[in-house]
Amino acid sequence: MTTPALSLRTAEITPENVGTALEVKVREDQNAFVAPVGRSLAQAYASRATAWPRLILDGDGAVGFVMANFEPDAEDPDFRCGI
């Protein structure tokens, strides 16, 4: 039996898809390890220069959310980028 291929891609958060992004949830037992999407989007808005929030799509369906940060000039190299 073959497994269907995934067509994963990232999409910028826009007014058109922000509602979909806010619906992305992790399993309940994972809640202690990640912030809700809404909180991450608020942080991204507050740090627009370095934040990279993205919706993860498989085809047209939302399957996840990732928040990255890029600050190549940060004094501490550990804070120059992160997920």
Image: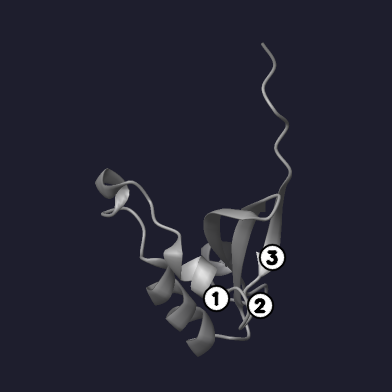
Q: CA distance from mark 3 to mark 2?
A: 26 Å
Query: How packed is label 2: few (under 14 Cα within 10 Å), some, or many (20 or more)?
Result: few
Q: Which comes sooner in the sequence, label 1 or label 3?
A: 3
Residue type indicated by callout 1: Val
24 on left or right of 73: left
Q: CA distance from mark 1 to mark 2?
A: 30 Å
Residue type indicated by callout 3: Ala
Q: Secondary structure at mark 2?
A: loop
* Residue 40 x/y as whole percent: 44, 72
Residue type indicated by callout 2: Asp
Residue at figure coordinates x 38%, y 75% from the top left:
39
Q: Which comes sooner in the sequence, label 1 or label 2?
A: 1
Q: Residue beneath label 3, please?
A: 11
Q: In the image, which is nearer the foreground, mark 3 or mark 2?
A: 3
Residue at figure coordinates x 69%, y 65% from the top left:
11
Query: Is 40 located above or below residue 10 in the figure?
Result: below
* Residue 41 x/y as whole percent: 48, 77
Q: Nearer the viewer, residue 51 or 30?
A: 30
Query: How packed is label 3: few (under 14 Cα within 10 Å), some, or many (20 or more)?
Result: some
Q: CA distance from mark 1 to mark 3?
A: 11 Å
Residue at figure coordinates x 53%, y 62% from the top left:
78
Q: Is residue 83 visible?
A: no
Q: Secondary structure at mark 3?
A: strand
Query: Is 29 located above or below residue 2 in the figure?
Result: below
Q: Nearer the viewer, residue 46 or 55?
A: 55
Q: Residue beneath label 1, please?
A: 18
